[in-house]
Image (cartoon, grey):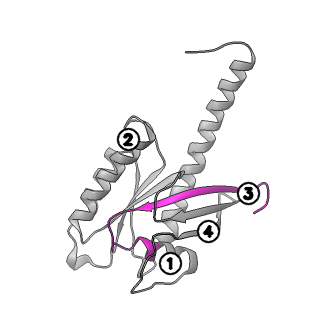
Amino acid sequence: MNKHQKRYKLVVFGASRIGKTSTILQFIDGRFIETYQPSGDETYQKTIQIDNKRVEIDISDYIRTRDGFILMYSITSRYSFDLIQDIHNEIYRIRDKEMNEHIPCIIVGNKSELTEEREVGTEEGMKYSESVQCHFIESSAKRNENINEIFEIITKDVIKYKENNNQIESSNEEIKQKGCFIV
């Protein structure tokens, strides 16, 4: 990574066996693995182009300090959809943020190829994502559908969020240097 290249940290959350790691591996390596035994300790890196800039992203399927959140459920599992709603609330609690404050997030309905087994409708996923001000997309790791789009959307959101926060922090620093302090 050169000194002008930015690095962003993403995390993929969701119930077990919904395709989180399959989605990550499809994005990183362009491959789909039918059976996978996670060790719970994987981190993946990839350099991508966002708006003509090279950015490095670190992706994991476990929580640490992360810049953006991918909340994934299987369209074939009502339980996994309900779980991401709890996870979303927990992210805000841990970050000590109000629900109307923005945190970079995308809701992903995975396994979209399994339409006959669908338990969560597209409209329901979209409606929920709108209610919590997150992006939304359905995907299929197996068919490599919308995989790149997931990571492009969340990375763009993280970049915008960080740029906005850096501008706010720069303004606050400028005010402090001039001898003013706003409480």
On the image, the x and y values in percent for residue 140 come to: 39, 75
Residue holding disc 4: 45
Which segment did they paint magenta? 1-23
Instruction: Specify whether residue 18 is painted magenta.
Output: yes
Q: Is residue 145 visible?
A: no
Q: Identity of the amino acid at label 1? A: Gln
Mark 3 touches mark 4? (CB < 8 Å): no
Label 2 or label 1, whichever lies nearer to me, is 2
Which residue corresponds to the image point at 70% horizontal and 19% vertical from the top-left? 176
Q: Identity of the amino acid at label 2? A: Arg
The label number, if any, that marks residue 5 in the structure image: 3
Q: Identity of the amino acid at label 4? A: Gln
The label number, if any, that marks residue 91 in the structure image: none
Q: Quadrant of the C terminus?
A: top right
Which residue corresponds to the image point at 39% horizontal and 34% vertical from the top-left? 98
Label 3 or label 2, whichever lies nearer to me, is 2
In three-dimensional space, the C-alpha distance between marks 3 and 4, rounded to whole angstroms, equals 14 Å
Q: Quadrant of the N terminus?
A: bottom right
Label 3 or label 4, whichever lies nearer to me, is 4
Q: Is residue 80 visible?
A: yes
Which residue corresponds to the image point at 32% horizontal and 79% vertical from the top-left? 113
Residue holding disc 2: 93
Q: Identity of the amino acid at label 3? A: Gln
Residue holding disc 1: 26
Instruction: Specify whether residue 20 is painted magenta.
Output: yes
Label 2 or label 4, whichever lies nearer to me, is 2
On the image, the x and y values in percent for residue 139 come to: 39, 70
Among numbered discs 2 and 1, the one appearing first in the sequence: 1
In three-dimensional space, the C-alpha distance between marks 3 and 1, rounded to whole angstroms, equals 23 Å
Question: Quarter-wise, where is residue 33 in the image?
Answer: bottom left
Among numbered discs 3 and 2, the one appearing first in the sequence: 3
Q: Quick one: SS at disc 4?
A: strand
